[in-house]
Each structure stands twice: as structure tokens, then as C-alpha cells.
Image (spheres, helix red, strand yellow):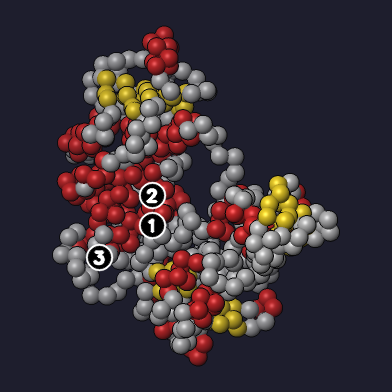
Amino acid sequence: MPNLVINNRAVEVAEGTSLLKAAREMGIEVPTLCHWEGVRPMNSCMLCVVREVKSGQLLPSCSTLVREGMEVETDGSEVCEARKEVLELLTSEHLGDCEAPCSHTCPASMNIPAMMRQIYTGDLDAAAFTVTNGLVFPWTLGYVCPAPCQNPCRRKQYDSTMQIRELHKAVAEKALKDNPELLECLPDTGKRVAIIGAGLAGMAAAWVLRKQGHACTVYEKESVAGGKLRRLPEKALPAAVLDTEIAWVARLGIDFFHDTEITEESLEPILESSDAVIVACKGVAKPGGKIFPAAEHKLAVRCVGNGKTAALWADRYLRSMDPRPKAAVFDSKAGKLAKTELETMRAVNENREAFPPAGTNGELADAREEAGRCLHCDCRKRSTCNLRRYASEYGVEKRKYTTTEERVYQVIGGDGDVIFEPGKCIKCGLCVEIARKHGEEIGLTFSGRGFDVEIKVPFGRALDQALQASAEECVAACPTAAISFRNKEDARNCHTALYTGK
């Protein structure tokens, strides 16, 4: 069995082991975009390069087998620069949105397209999870939010905007009656958090932190929670709606102390007895250390976003992590699309089948019909896309390499459930090999040469015909969601709604 050294650590591995496998067995992270278990090494992305110390060569770790006496490094400056270069080349020609324009402009960062898919397919429990953890007060915001998400909606550019606010309002009203599982929290951490102020920002922070298993106590100087929303007339916001959602937050096991004004002096004992403090009002304490700000705002939905963000920082602090991640999240934007491109998007993504879909019993039929108009311009793997993940980690410069070639948005799918967006494809070839592994009669193939190479369905056949047995694995393996299912969300995407905010 060969002996080698990886990152100054000696290891013995089995003959025929790749450098990638050897490193990962040692717990060393090596990034890949074209590697998939059960598929031969593709050597197409070159992101997995490592440096052989003696020769100075950069080697693709997925296909290079270990040799006796090798010494390699996986994270030196030369290696990282090479990986960054690869990622900047790939992202420079990437045509697609990481976040849909509606989600991008939602101050609370709710995953709006996921909600649309869930409502349309009749998965109202999943929709309830998305809207409740995304907005915390989705029923209240259904009345008072100015819906900044609706203006950049691509459906508006095509004909008329999606009625996003009305949809989360309808789902929320039903969720508060039928979805007690939304109150489930992670196991108790033993950490205690004090929240000063029971406006939407403070209560949103309390919701997120309690869901993460931390004990929460909210202090409010007024006799009731709700802040400035209490001053709205009944016609604008029925008090019963706000009361119901506040009670819903309290049911998580959050303690509320009303008629309790906290000053700098009275804050001291709270600081001593708490592991973290969220300040959601003015003039109590300056942020720093274990004190985190959650500013109230004239926009109610912005208050929720601020509360979620403060909770994210506090949660990381309580888990002994850097409160604010240093790396900016990479965000690809397709930009403004021409009418013809929007028509292409509509033709494939709009749900036009007889309504309501089978098995959904007609619940919220109008909402599901409206949700079927969504163009789904988001990425189905917005939280799990490996290209986005590594572009963020390596600090990729957006559009470093430009081209004079005008790229046109395309989406291929016909009437089937599988869709393919060529602009997101990095030509890794995994889908070609996976289809071959499954013995697909048609499968996929490379077409063209050099920079013009593309993934195609042979003989002009439909994508669903090409991927009859291998669609599930192709979608799972695709590093960028270039291949995805029309009405299915990567399950891990929806759960991130709890942790994001602006």
C-alpha cells in the first residue's frame, strides 16, 4: 500500500486510490464540480487540482492515482489561485439567476418561487413552512406589506405581476389553523437570549432563535406586543390577525414581559443572566460583544428581515462561530430578458394543465391557479449549487472575463417534468455518463467542438424521452441545476429561509 504525504500529514492508502479520495478520507475538503460517485473521472472542471510539491505540477485529484512517496498540498496559494481562475471562467459565461428577482428584493428573503411551486402542486404544508419561516408574520404582512417583490417580477415584464402578497396571505391564514408542526424547535441548547422590544424585528428574532433551540425572553415597554402596527386602523390591519400571529410566536415557548421598559441601567442584570441580547429598540445599548441590533423600520417586512439577520448573527455567536460570515455570497443575475426570452421561459415553466391538479381536493384553488403562472426564473439549487458555493468561498470576481458574443436565455423541456437550461450548464458531462450508466436508449451527448460544445438530446427527441430512467440521478448530480425538475425544489433550499435576511 502506497505511503504519501498530504498537507504535511503522512498517510497509507490502498493501491489505486485517487488523490481526491485519499484527501477526503483524511477529512480534507477538495472542491469538485464534475465528480460523482459511480461515474468515471471526467476531468472537465479542473477545480479539484492539487499541487505535487516535488515537481510543482498541478494535478487533477479526481483522476490522479496515488504513488509511493508522493507529497501534495491541497490548499496552497498557487492551488487556490488556479481554482479561482477556473471558477471565474465558469461564472463569466453563466446565464441564470441564483435568486429570483422577487426573492432578491424581498427584505425578509423569503423563497418566493418555492412557495409558488408548493402552492401549485398542492403541497400546502410545505408552502406553510416556507411562508412562516420566511416572513414569520405572513398573514399580517399580507395586509401591510407594500410588496416590493412584485415590481421586479418577470411575469410583470411579460404581462402582469404575480400576486405574491395575496398568496402568502392565503397560505398563512390556513397554516395557523392546520400546521402545528411549524412550532417544532431544535433541541434546547442551554443558551438564553434576551430580546428588547416586541415589534416585528424583536419578535422575528425571537422566532428564529427559539426555533434554533435557544431559550428566549422578550421585554416590551408597552402593555401589548406589536409596536407601530398597533396604531393602524382596523380596516388596514385587523387586530385579530396580528394578535393571532403574536400568539403563534409565543406558543414556541417564548416568554413575554410587557410594561417593562429596559434602560441602560436595568439592562445590566439582563446582560449578566443572558448569553446574547437582541436590541430591537432605540437608546438601550450599543451593539458589540454579545449585543446584536435588530432595527425597526418603516417597512414592516424590513423589520422582519432585520430581526432574522440579527438572529442569524446571534445564533452563530452562541455556537462559537464568527457572527458574520466573511465571504460574500456569489450572486449571478441574468439581467433584463427580451420579450422573446420571456416567452421561451413562459412556454416551458408556466403550468397550463387542467386545474386543479389531481389529488389536491380543490384547497385554495384560486391561489394554486395564480401560482401556476410563475415563470420560475430562480435556481432550483440556490442553496446547494456547488458553483455558487465555491464561487463564494474563493471570492470570485463577477464577469471578470467578458465576451462580445450575445447570449440568449434558453430553456428546454417540452411538456415533461425535466427541464434543461443551457446557460447554466458547465459542460461537466456528468449527465451524459449517468444516462449511459442507466442504459438510456437515447440519453444525452456532446455536440460541437471547442468553445461551441453543448449538451444535446440526440435525434431531436424530447428531454423526458432521453432521461427516462436516469432523470433523478442527473438532477441530483448536476452541480448547477442546469438540469432540474419543473415543479420540484431541492428540499434543502426551503429550510434556508429560516437563516437568511437582509
CA distance separating discs 1 and 3: 23 Å
Percent position of residue 188, x then y: 34, 32
Does 63 appear above or below 169?
Answer: below
- Amino acid marked by disc 2: His
Which mark identifies residue 495?
Answer: 2
Percent position of residue 328, x then y: 58, 45
CA distance separating discs 3 and 2: 25 Å
Name the residue beneath numbered marker 3: 369
Element type at mark 3: helix
Percent position of residue 36, x then y: 54, 66
Question: How many numbered circles are shown?
Answer: 3
Element type at mark 2: helix
> Residue furthest toward the top?
265
CA distance separating discs 2 and 1: 7 Å
Kindly indicate whether the residue at mark 1 contacts the one at mark 2 (C-beta within 8 angstroms): yes
The residue positioned 61% from the left and 60% from the top of the image is 21
- Amino acid marked by disc 1: Ala
Q: Camera-side residue: 183 or 200?
A: 183
Which numbered mark, 3 or 2, is in the foreground of this view?
2
Name the residue beneath numbered marker 1: 491
The residue positioned 26% from the left and 16% from the top of the image is 259
Q: Camera-side residue: 324 or 436?
A: 436
- The crowding category of the residue bearing disc 1, from other C-alpha atoms within 10 Å (few below 14, some 14 to 19, many at least 20), is some
Does 206 appear above or below 264?
Answer: below
Q: Camera-side residue: 141 or 291?
A: 291
Percent position of residue 200, x then y: 33, 33
